Image: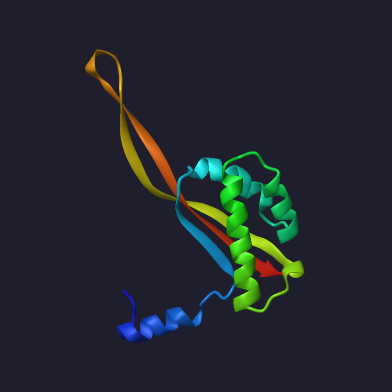
Amino acid sequence: MARGHRSQIKRQRNEVKDTRPRAKVSYARISVQKACFVLDAIRGKSVEEALAIVTYNPRYASEILQKLINSAVANAENNNGMNRANLFIEECYADRGPIMKRVQPRAKGSAYRIEKRISHITVVLNER
């Protein structure tokens, strides 16, 4: 169990706050597996190189990631005063979100369940 009063515990937890610029899209209508194909391609790359990869990638996740990277770069420039040329993608990951369950009618009165998967995608930048 934690030691100390609630406010002390919160204070200690907030002292180690991460100040790296980030952007997150919640409830993106794409499965985690499909998003990870593009995320694996851009992880560790510079921002300009990642945007080039995402621009010419035919997958649907690349459209979402292009907006997300641009948002993270804008956060880095405006909030942290970082230079766009020095930025690179330090972390990018997709977490599982809720699943919308739908039903498809099948033969002999049965039904198949269709699961429409949703993900939360996060991009974290850093400066070289």
Q: Quadrant of residue 78?
A: bottom right
Which residue is painted at 43% across and 83% down in the image?
12
Q: Position of residue 120 (x, y in %)?
A: 47, 54
Foreground residue among 127 and 13: 127
One can see residue 36 in this view: yes
The quadrant of the rendering that contains the N terminus is bottom left
Left or right: 102, with 18 as reference point: left
Q: How did the renderer colour the structure?
A: rainbow
Foreground residue among 35 and 18: 35
Which residue is painted at 59% across and 71% down in the image?
75
The quadrant of the rendering that contains the C terminus is bottom right
Left or right: 17, with 124 as reference point: left
Left or right: 31, with 1 as reference point: right
Which residue is painted at 62% across and 59% down in the image?
69
One can see residue 46 in this view: no
Residue occupying the far top of the picture = 108
- Number of numbered discs on residues: 0
Foreground residue among 44 and 98: 98
Which residue is painted at 41% across and 84% down in the image?
11
Q: Position of residue 117 (x, y in %)?
A: 42, 42
Q: Position of residue 110 (x, y in %)?
A: 25, 20
Residue occupying the far left of the picture = 109
Q: Quadrant of residue 34?
A: top right
